[in-house]
Every structure is written in C-alpha cells, then in structure tokens.
Image (tube, grey):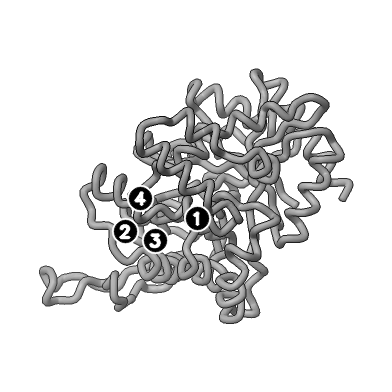
Amino acid sequence: MRISSLLSYAGGFKDAVKEVQVLEKAGLDVVWVPEAYSFDAPSAMGYLAANTERVTIASGILPIYTRTPTLLAMTAAGIDYLSDGRCMLGLGASGPQVIEGFHGVPYTNPVGRIREIIEICRMVWRRERVQHLGRHYQIPLPQNLGTGLGKPLKLINHPVREEIPIAIASLGDTSVAMTAELADAWLPAFYTADAAKAVWGEALAKGSAKRDPNRAPLEIFAGGGVAIGKGVEHLRNLSRPQTALYVGGMGARSKNFYNDIFCKSGFAKEAKLIQDLYLAGDKKAAEAAIPDDYLARNSLIGDEGFVRERVLALKESGVTALNVGFMGSSTAERVANCEKLRNIVDSL
C-alpha cells in the first residue's frame, strides 16, 4: 500500500516542502497539493518537482470549472516533465459556493464534464489532434460559435508518458460509478472501512463492470489521522472541528454530500443533530455531538495493534493506498509517525 498525505502549508509553503523532503525519506509515496480558493496548486507542484526525488506529486484537487480540459492536460504534462514522470492529475467538482462565488462560473453537470475531460486529457497526452464534440466541450469550437478559424491541434511537446494517472475526488453514486469506470484513482471523503460497502459498494460495482479490462485496477486512497503509540487516543478529537464543518455546515441543509455519507455510515440521527447545531451557530455543541466511535473508525490513532487492525480493515474493504495526516506538534513527531506507519504497512 502506498502512503499519501495532503500538503499543509498553513505555516509557510517552503517550510512545508522541506517537511515533505524528510517525509519522502521516511516512506511517504504521494503528496496531494490542494487548491480551493488559495494559491494555485500547479505552481506548488512545480516547486515540489524541483525539490523532491521520489514522491508522486498529485493535485488534490484541481476544480474542473477553473480550466479548459486541454489546459488541465497541458498542466499535468508539464509537471510530469518537470518531475520525470511523477505527476498525478487529481480532479474534482469542488462546490457551487467556490465555483460560482469565487470563479463566477456556473456549477453545472459535474459528472458529465469530468467524463469528457478524462477523454480529452488522454487524447492530448497521446498527441492526437484534439477533436471532441461532446455535450459540454466542443473542440475545436464549431464555426457557428466563434470566428470559424479554429482547427484541430495536437500538443507540441512530447509528454514523458502517454498515460498520466487521473484521480477523481467523488462522493455521489453517479460520480463514484463514473470514477470506477474511467479513473486511475479514487479519493473519497469520510471513508470508513466498516461502512464503505453500504455507502459506495453498489456504485463501485456498477462502474467497475464498465471498466476497460486493459486498465489497471482502481487505486483507492483512504485512511485518516495518524498517531501511533500509547495514550494518543485523545488526538482523535482534533478532527472534530473539521468533521463538524463538513457534516454540519458544508453546503445547504438540503444538499450536503458529507452529511449524506455520515447518514449512510450508520449515523443518521447524529448527522441531523450535528447539522442542526452547526447551522444554529453552536459549533462547539456540533463538535461534541460527533460519536467517539466514528472518530476511532475514521482514524489511525492508537497503539500499534489498533493501527494495524484499522489498516487491515481498510485493505479488506478495498483500499489500496492510504491517505493520511500525520499528527504531531513538530516535524520530528510527524516524521516518526510516518516511519511507524511505513513499518506497519510493510509488515502486512
């Protein structure tokens, strides 16, 4: 199992990259570079390419509405070149609050758009002349929609690889089925081994049935916070604010994908309570309403035996790569947790 982690540069981007360099030596395999409405991810990914040797550098995620499909392909090909074949293009729809509120672009048909983007990206990387007449993207632009001067073009450069892995951050049944059918990797949120089949089993099976048999199996990234040792269980509580934010306040009351997942995971009563409290402004009560059992299942925080048991449960549920956050107040502590997790994974 590969080990991945999200790049957190709240304390300074260059310092975060220095930590990645140490984590790389300790066993980290993939680093996800986020992009919400912060600095752009590709700039950071290029910097990482110049300052790392082995890790896969993945966008985690690039919102599909912020770039044309061909620019997404060009960006991934450029980073793949800079990193000697270590790029992974992570894509997702983000949400209407960001897409319409920050970018001023209509949030429409995310699943259909991602499907077409995947097809176009792979066409670009094969250096084919791009010709795509889809529902959402028409390349070249039809004559009646522009100057009429557009013509099919192919990428000037020769990419390092004709196939750059594409990871999709998806949650809903339709989007997860599409991910299982077409993508190389899946980045789910609020994944717990115990509830994965109930939440996503049917969608994954539906998409897998349509998957090209020549394509490698879907890589599934999931995990949680990591702290390995005695007396560290209290660190599970550090995820309460973020969990309350997503389950309680991310999206509208009637449309919150994270709340839906929490319900399907066996916590429907708690999901409603968390949302009611959060939207009423009582964030601390919303955090307190998150069950301890959920926090335990959604983490790799505990003694070595507990963590080994949870990693095995994740593996048995279909997870093929861990996506984790290393706990600790210093780089040394976070690196130590990475090393411990690497040892556990390698011993399975």
**Which mark is in front, 1 or 3?**
1
Q: Nearer the viewer, residue 162 or 15?
A: 15
Query: At which x and y percent is residue 152?
Result: 29, 73
Residue under the point 59% across and 29% down: 238
**Which mark is in front, 4 or 3?**
4
Earlier residue among tags 4 and 3:
3
Query: At which x and y percent is residue 168?
Result: 50, 58
**Which mark is in front, 3 or 2?**
2
Q: Which residue is mark 3?
A: 156
Q: CA distance from mark 4 to mark 1?
A: 22 Å
Residue under the point 30% across and 51% down: 96
Residue flagged by tag 1: what amino acid is it? Answer: Ala
Earlier residue among tags 4 and 2:
2
Query: At which x and y percent is residue 342?
Result: 79, 40
Earlier residue among tags 4 and 1:
1
Residue flagged by tag 2: what amino acid is it? Answer: Thr
Residue flagged by tag 4: what amino acid is it? Answer: Arg
The crowd level at tag 1 (other Cα within 10 Å; few <14, some 14-19, many 20+) is many
